[in-house]
Amino acid sequence: PAERLNGLGTTIFAEMSALAVATGSVNLGQGFPDRDGPDSLLEDAIAAIRAGANQYPPGRGVPALRQAIVDHQKRFYDLSYDPDTQVLVTTGATEAIAAALLAFVEPGDEVIALEPYYDSYAAGIAFAGGRRVPVTLRAPSYRLDLDELRAAVTPRTKVLLINSPHNPTGTVLDDEELRGIRDVAVEHDLVVITDEVYEHLVYDGTHRPLATYDGMADRTVSISSAGKTFAVTGWKIGWVTGSPDVVTAVTTAKQFLTFTSGAPFQPAVANALALGNDYYDALRADLQSRRDLLATGLTDLGFEVHLPAATYFVTTDIRPLGHTDGIDFCRMLPQKAGVVAIPHQVFYDNPAPGRPLVRWAFCKQPDVLQEALNRLQKL
Ligand code: PMP
Ligand code: GLN
């Protein structure tokens, strides 16, 4: 195999979900909900299949979904886009990230990414021939140190790859951090790829897209996805918004990765994006109560718990329980307690800060979370 695959191996999510199945463990590893999202959405996809939406849709996405994405950006963020030139539908945010990196990174270019980072970032940067430069969000606050960001920029820096709300820490970048990112991007003329798939799963604070900041409209690739917002992670419908030039560049890469994406899912997601505020509010309230259930339970078990402001994930430090290495801990956990979690270490280039950290997903039914907590008494 080619050198670009070096170090990629099997994703931690595949490894840990397989281990959960093999050991009958409660899977709090890979972040996917155990209830599918709204009935109307599921019915709309079934109806779309029956109505014949089964052949290649337009490359940039079906018109109804592109319009719904435009309406969503206006409704939630007062951002204005043209559905014909400024929106691209992708096969999940994962394809959007890969296509954006292929579109903007030359071999040897440096890509600054917030560490710990979602694992497909490393692969996408490697496929584009780029070099990863991490800027670490450090315990206990997991905030962005703007001095570290500035210090990471070199003449070879091309892209800032930002993720807010942030997986796995749950950090929602605040106004000062976002302005700092904007200032660095403008000063050094960088492209900013911003992964905002957890935009509607924010429990404390508010999410503000980078694209809303002055100077960002023409240099930002904004990415989101239906997976988290509508609890259909297997549908793999994502999208990109940005300037016409940015979207054309990403489209050029996307058309030769997959050409088009999930025909019958697109009209269904279009309708879901237009659901009333009651849907979005209930989604958030529901997940917030699960976050609190899991965080309280893990605290009672003796973990040092970081309460995340957003996302599906609680981060814990395992040292109060006498463990030091998250990978060893997560490999032992299914056998010992029948629970699966994810070690932070796999999301770092320099693993030291992540070594004692473990991530637990709370996008599960309350009785499932309670069962996991009961099992963890055995530790
Ligand atoms: N970005 C982040 C930060 C994620 O956690 C995930 C995974 N759930 C994705 C992107 C991938 O999204 P999708 O399933 O839409 O490809
Ligand atoms: N984003 C999900 C997580 O962080 C999983 C995605 C995947 O399996 N690649 O758990």
Image (tube, rainbow, N blue to C red):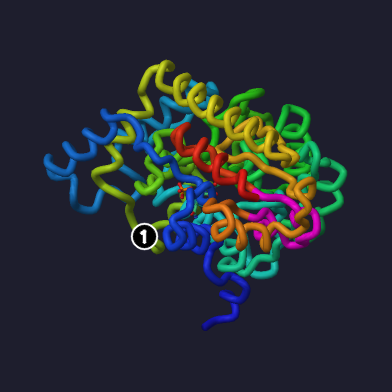
Question: Which x, y percent locates residue 170?
Answer: 65, 37
Was residue 157 drawn as part of the magenta stretch in this picture? no
Tell me what residue is drawn at x 35 percent, y 34 percent.
Answer: 37
In the displayed structure, 121 sits above or below 321; it is below
Element marked by disc 1: loop
Residue closest to the eye, 357 or 118? 357
Residue at (43% x, 57% y) in the render: 254
Q: Report if the beta carbon of the residue with label 1 is closer than 8 angstroms to ligand 1.
A: no
Q: Is residue 354 magenta?
A: yes
Residue 43 occupies quadrant = top left
Q: Dot 1 corresponds to which residue? A: 258
Of 368 and 316, the residue lying toward us: 368
Given the image, on which type of amino acid does mark 1 rest? Thr
The magenta-colored residue range is: 343-358
- Residue ID at (79%, 54%): 353
* Residue 296 appears anywhere in the view: yes
Q: Is residue 39 left or right of residue 311?
A: left
